[in-house]
Image: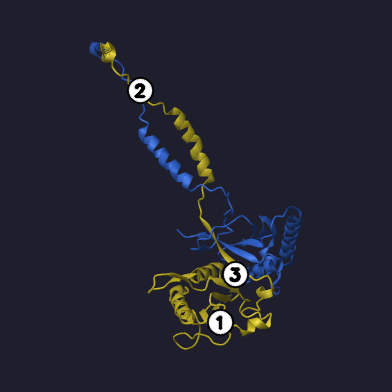
Amino acid sequence: MAFQPSKSKKNHAKEEGSLNMNSMMDMMTIILLFLLKSFSTEGALVTPSQQLRLPVSDQELKPKKELTVSIAKDVLMVNDAVIMSVSDIEKNQMLIPSLADRLSDYAAQEHELEVDVGKEFTHEVIIEGDEKIPFELLFKVMFTCSKTEFYKMRLLTIRKG
Amino acid sequence: MAYKPSMRRKNEDEEMELDIRPVMNLMVVLIPLLIAGAEWVKLSVIEINVPPAKAADGSGVGDNKNDIKEKQKKLGLTIAISDAGITIGNAGVILSGESGEGPTVGKLEDGKYDYAKLREKLIDLKKKIVGKGFVDENRAVLTASADIEYQTIVTIMDNLQTYTDEESKQVLPLFPEVNFSKVLQ
């Protein structure tokens, strides 16, 4: 025979459970504050990849958005458009012709803008180099930049800490 | 006559719970938004201002474009990085290392460059020349062998920026104006 259902338990009112949200709210508030602090309106300046790992430094200077020349392990890019493969760079020539062409185009554009709408040509260029690239390559790129009117160079690095 | 106190005070205060659902909704929207916009890697830049003229082609230290410049005292500090180590010098002299030859600052035993010692030597040098009227007392010309890694150069530039004077506790510039010179052969 089955047990008789308990008569005393039947009368117990069902306890209504409610989720305690206080601690969750605390957590959310902290996360929100933390994220607000690290919020940047600049947007991503550089897309990190296996081929482009920036060197580490302890400089404090903040980067501004400018024309970027990226030297990855395999390719050379201007404003994220691939110019040429690193292996195609002439060994015995200081100037990199295709990079120089592209940079002169940008310089000409900037000059036009300066005349037409008064936007000042800053001559600034950001060089993003992979931490492993040899000095020779870096120097060639810097030489090419300075030859094409972009003589205010900024080396992009990752801040320590 | 004073008013008669209300008889309703016996009514139990109804417990009110704050309705936090709208706030939660807001959080749920805001947090993903902020995660997307967060700055995960802090970037910084090192400034290199090459004069618009032809200084970048490796003519290097003294680009004597006019006669006035020649009368000024030039230091022309050059820091050369090679596989063996780092050499400090200028057009006239080279700081010798401990053994009397080879680079000024050799490599450490594990094959890394000895940045601490380089810094020490440069601070010594800076203290000797500061205030002596050199026009380029903040300038250093950096040069390296062809295959030196970018990270090495950046680290050396870091070490060239500032130093703290022990007596006055001030942060003073070391050689923050870095120029590059042609690749060492």
Q: Specify whether B43 is left or right of A102.
A: left
Label 1, label 3: how far apart the Cα atoms are: 28 Å
Q: Specify whether A134 is left or right of B112.
A: right
Label 1, label 2: how far apart the Cα atoms are: 78 Å
Type of amino acid under label 2 = Met
Q: Residues within 10 Å of mark 1 (few under 14, many from 20)?
A: many
Residue situated in front as seen by the camera: B144 or B169: B169
Write down the residue under mark 1.
B75
Determine the residue located farthest toward the front in the rendered image: B1
Type of amino acid under label 3 = Pro
Chain of the residue where label 2 is placed in the rendered structure: B
Residue situated in front as seen by the camera: B52 or B154: B52
Classify residue A139 by image quadrant: bottom right
Which shade of the palette goes to chain B?
A: yellow
Tag 2 or tag 1, which sits nearer the N-term?
2
Q: Tell if the residue under mark 1 belongs to the same chain as the one under mark 3.
A: no
Which shade of the palette goes to chain A?
A: blue
Q: Specify whether B14 is left or right of A33.
A: left
Q: Residues within 10 Å of mark 3 (few under 14, many from 20)?
A: many
